[in-house]
Image: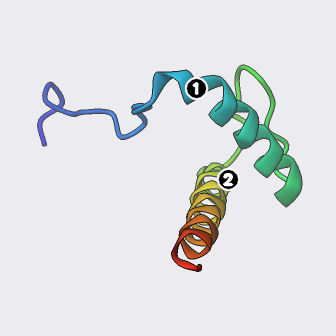
Amino acid sequence: MSGTNNKSSNKINVPEAKAALEQYKFEVASEIGVPLKKGYNGDLTSAQNGYVGGYMVKKMIEAQEKAMAGKTQG
């Protein structure tokens, strides 16, 4: 991909969810012991940041699976 045509994979598809996602990120970081703080986090490793993002996705998928399972029963 060329640098001018890159699209951010961090785009929030539902802008109204931005604040909730930001709060969720800090909750997850705290839960897994990553010292994420508001503002600059350049002192964290890419592994730490990746772990936060990956764990967020895992938990969101799990929540959606539970919601879907509940909708299909009964």
Name the residue rendered at 66%, 24% in the picture.
Answer: 19
Q: Image check: 33 left or right of 3?
A: right
Q: Where's the N terminus, which quadrant?
A: top left
Amino acid at the residue labelled 2: Val
Q: Residue at x 70, y 23 (%)?
A: 40
| Neighbour tally class for label 2: few under 14, some 14-19, many 20 plus, Cα within 10 Å | many
**Closer to the observer: label 2 or label 1?**
1
In the drawing, what numbered circle is on residue 52?
Answer: 2
> At 45% across and 30% down in the image, what residue appears?
14
Looking at the rendered structure, the secondary structure element under dot 1 is helix
Name the residue at 87% across, 48% down.
30
For disc 1, the marked residue is 18
Between the residue at mark 2 and the residue at mark 1, the CA separation in whole angstroms equals 16 Å
Q: Are marks 2 and 1 in contact (CB under 8 Å)?
A: no
Q: Earlier in the sequence, mark 2 or mark 1?
A: 1
Q: Look at label 1 and name its amino acid.
A: Lys
Q: How many marks?
A: 2
| Colouring used for the render | rainbow
Q: Compared with residue 31, is residue 71 higher up or lower down, i.e. above or below?
A: below
Instruction: Tell me where residue 60 appears, x and y as whole percent.
Output: 60, 58
**Rendered image quadrant of residue 23:** top right
Image position of 19 with respect to 70: above or below: above
Crowding near the residue tagged with mark 1, few <14, some 14–19, many ≥20 C-alpha atoms within 10 Å: few
- Residue situated furthest bottom in the rendering: 73
Secondary element under disc 2, as helix, strand or loop, is helix
1 with respect to 19 (left or right): left
Image height of 41 relative to 55, above or below:
above
